[in-house]
Amino acid sequence: MPSTSGVDTDPRTPTAPAERMVELDTLRGFAVFGILVVNMAYFYNPFYPVPTHLEQGTDTIDRIVKWGLLFFAAGKFYTLFSFLFGLGMALQMTRAQASGVPFITRYMRRLCILFLIGAAHIAFFWAGDILTAYAVLGFPLLLFRNRSDRSILRWSVFFLILPVVISMALFGLIELAAKSPETAAQIEQDFASSAASYAAMYTQSLHVYASGTFVEIAAQRLEDIQYTSLRYLFNGNGPHIFASFLFGFLVGRWESFRMIAADIPRIRRLMGWSLAIGIVANLVYVVAETSSHPTRPSAMGILKSASFAIGAPAFSCFYVVTILLLLRQQRWREHLAPLSAVGRMALSNYLMQSLICTTLFYGYGLGLYGMIGPAAGLSLCVAIWMLQTGVSLWWGKRFRFGPVEWLWRSLTYLKVQPIRQKG
């Protein structure tokens, strides 16, 4: 496969476009589209649990699309992107070590800059930002750089199942406390109060985003970020992201990703097993997700957490190995080239999605907030994706990096990087 990881290039400068791995850029491009598909519901709807009487998309097509997104997309693409983040760190570290260049200081600076980009994303566009979480979780990832493969794998599994353990513990504690009639009554009262509070926050958020000014919407985002931050801590996103970081780092550290990409029998075995496991786990997840209470610990909630912990990585693995297998064929490499173009400027495209969607939905734009359902949202994703693909192809012919990637790299290396393509 005619691509390199950039390990043999000068580590004091960013990896040049010609030295990038086509496989990784293609996977990043695929992940960027999937992230848009999942995020779309939170661009046109509040983050808070939807009160039953306000739920959009109750017709058959919307329900089918919603179930399809839960089955094929929910959790799969941030898992994939997190895996690639960890893998990328491993490749950068290997590249620096091979040339005797210090790695830690520069990588920490890189994470700090990513955090600032994410903070700006929250301040000016959207409270669902994932960049700040990546930046924060990137620091503890550095602590694992000298760990053994077995240790990293064990910790990855630990963080993957941690949300399941937390869900079981919360449910067990509530069930134990509810054995007392007085405590049971208080618990029910607390849950009712919590549901009323979320309904009020949902209604307020719906009104502000649909008709508020830029300043009013910015203030609402500051309230929303408190809720989304708690979601990262308690609903499994944070631990799952870190588990994917660790596994990606493990795969990338010894360049086993390249070996897997070249091993067709292994790819086909992985494809079969990941598809089979993913189908079963994600069917269970869809049932559990649509049957469990969004905020109250329950047995169905435990099943949802457990099936998610299995199903999301399984389908992410299936997507990875399928794309790697397709890239072995020249015809498919040409067909998938647009994905690679999008992936080369994944950060810019991720932020562009927020710019486009907030302009479409928020009150200072077209004000379409709360007015569409899952089917229309998916159609809009396809339209945005086509636009981003065209922009990425046009940009890639003229420039070496995406605009935000260029800023990130220039600040990381403390030197303005050349952005125009040579010749």
Image (tube, rainbow, N blue to C red):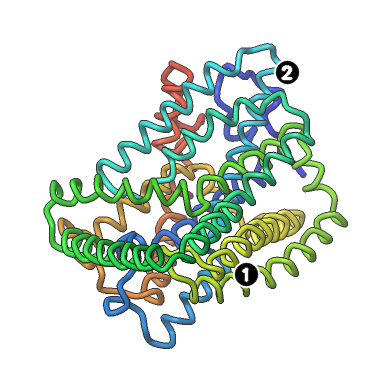
Q: Is residue 393 left or right of residue 257?
A: left
Looking at the image, which residue sits at the far bottom? 60
Q: Is residue 394 left or right of residue 3?
A: left
Where residue 124 sits: x, y (%)? Answer: 25, 43
Bin the neighbour count of mark 2 within 10 Å (Cα to Cα): few under 14, some 14-19, many 20 and up. some
Between 191 and 305, the residue placed more toward the observer is 191
Location of mark 1 (residue): 282
Between 285 and 73, the residue placed more toward the observer is 285
The residue at the point 55 percent across, 72 percent down is 288
Where residue 276 sits: x, y (%)? Answer: 75, 69
The residue at the point 20 percent across, 59 percent down is 209
Where residue 248 sits: x, y (%)? Answer: 67, 41
Location of mark 2 (residue): 98
Instruction: Say whether residue 366 is visible.
Output: no
The mark nearer the N terminus, 1 or 2, is 2
Badge 2 element:
helix
| Disc 1 to disc 2, C-alpha distance | 41 Å
| Amino acid under disc 1 | Asn
| Amino acid under disc 2 | Ala
Between 302 and 350, the residue placed more toward the observer is 302
